[in-house]
Image: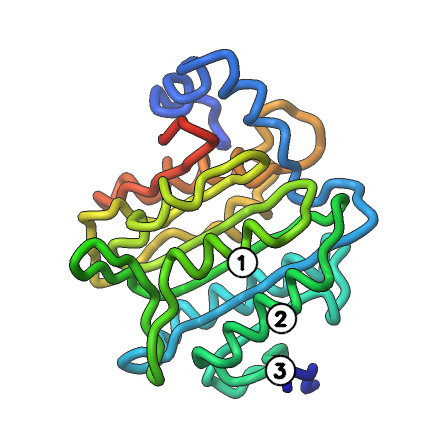
């Protein structure tokens, strides 16, 4: 049972090109503020333990947890699964606890809920089956799609990190969803430099000067940063991929 244990230089040709892609994309750019005024917040943070836990990824996940708490999320709104003993952990990561955490998300979300799902793991694909792998088994993309489809929400941000993390993007895309991956489907790096919390916390990422940094704005800033290292994050907004 899960229980709480106690840019900016607007200079980049990349950003300009992305913003000018389509009128609908510009509209969507500002539709998902990170700290929007909402009655409900829910978040799920998962750090895989397959072949050991990356300490760098753990640090980024904890920082994301802390960011959410600074922006309207109560501790009980967030479920954090990791095999490491960190202060904000709810339970060990593993297939059974991942399934239970998604079920809690389904049961606790409402039409006005802002949902954030953050998964740090290398995406795997075998014979066209895409899945996340944990020390005790795997969870398929189709399972996650089914759980998200059962979840009520006003908006949903899905952040997936690690090698080949773009594998899930197009399959997860949908209405009122922002799906982002730290790499393309065919990409891998020794170090994943994508850190969405860094740009969510950067006032220079606020493209429309409304005083808030949306997840899309943060993605654009973060992509600008990591592309200097040859890393190519991806973003899906409905049928548009960046």
Q: Secondary structure at mark 1?
A: helix
Numbered marks: total? 3
| Identity of the residue drawn at 71% across and 45% down | 35
- The secondary structure type at the circle numbered 2 is strand
Sequence order check, earlier mark of 1 and 2:
2
Q: Which mark is residue 79?
A: 2
Instruction: Find numbered disc 3 in the image and state the secondary structure of the residue it sits on.
Output: loop
Q: Earlier in the sequence, mark 3 or mark 1?
A: 3
Label 2 environment density (alpha carbons within 10 Å; few <14, some 14–19, many ≥20): many
Callout 3: 10 Å neighbours few (<14), some, many (20+)? few
> Mark 1 to mark 2: distance in Å?
15 Å
Q: What residue is shown at x 63% (from left), y 53% (from top)?
A: 151
**Residue name at image x 21 percent, y 63 percent:** 190
Q: Quadrant of the C terminus?
A: top left
Q: Which mark is residue 147?
A: 1
Closer to the eye: label 3 or 1: 1
């Amino acid at each position: 049972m899960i229980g709480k244990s106690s840019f900016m230089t607007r200079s980049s040709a990349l950003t300009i090109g992305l913003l000018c892609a389509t009128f609908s994309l510009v509209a969507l750019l500002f539709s998902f503020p990170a700290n929007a005024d909402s009655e409900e917040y829910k978040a799920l943070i998962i750090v895989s333990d397959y072949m050991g836990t990356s300490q760098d990824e753990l640090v980024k996940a904890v920082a994301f947890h802390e960011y959410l708490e600074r922006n309207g999320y109560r501790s009980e709104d967030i479920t954090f699964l990791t095999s490491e003993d960190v202060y904000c952990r709810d339970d060990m990561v593993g297939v059974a606890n991942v399934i239970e955490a998604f079920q809690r998300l389904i049961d606790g979300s409402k039409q006005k809920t802002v949902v954030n799902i953050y998964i740090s793991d290398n995406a795997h694909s075998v014979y066209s089956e895409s899945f996340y792998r944990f020390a005790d088994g795997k969870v398929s993309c189709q399972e996650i799609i089914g759980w998200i489809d059962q979840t009520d929400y006003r908006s949903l941000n899905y952040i997936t990190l690690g090698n080949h993390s773009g594998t899930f993007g197009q399959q997860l895309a949908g209405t009122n969803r922002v799906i982002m991956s730290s790499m393309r489907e065919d990409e891998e790096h020794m170090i994943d430099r994508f850190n969405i919390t860094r740009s969510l916390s950067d006032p220079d990422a606020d493209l429309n000067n409304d005083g808030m940094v949306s997840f899309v704005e943060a993605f654009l800033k973060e992509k600008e940063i990591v592309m200097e290292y040859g890393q190519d994050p991806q973003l899906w907004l409905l049928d548009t991929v960046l």
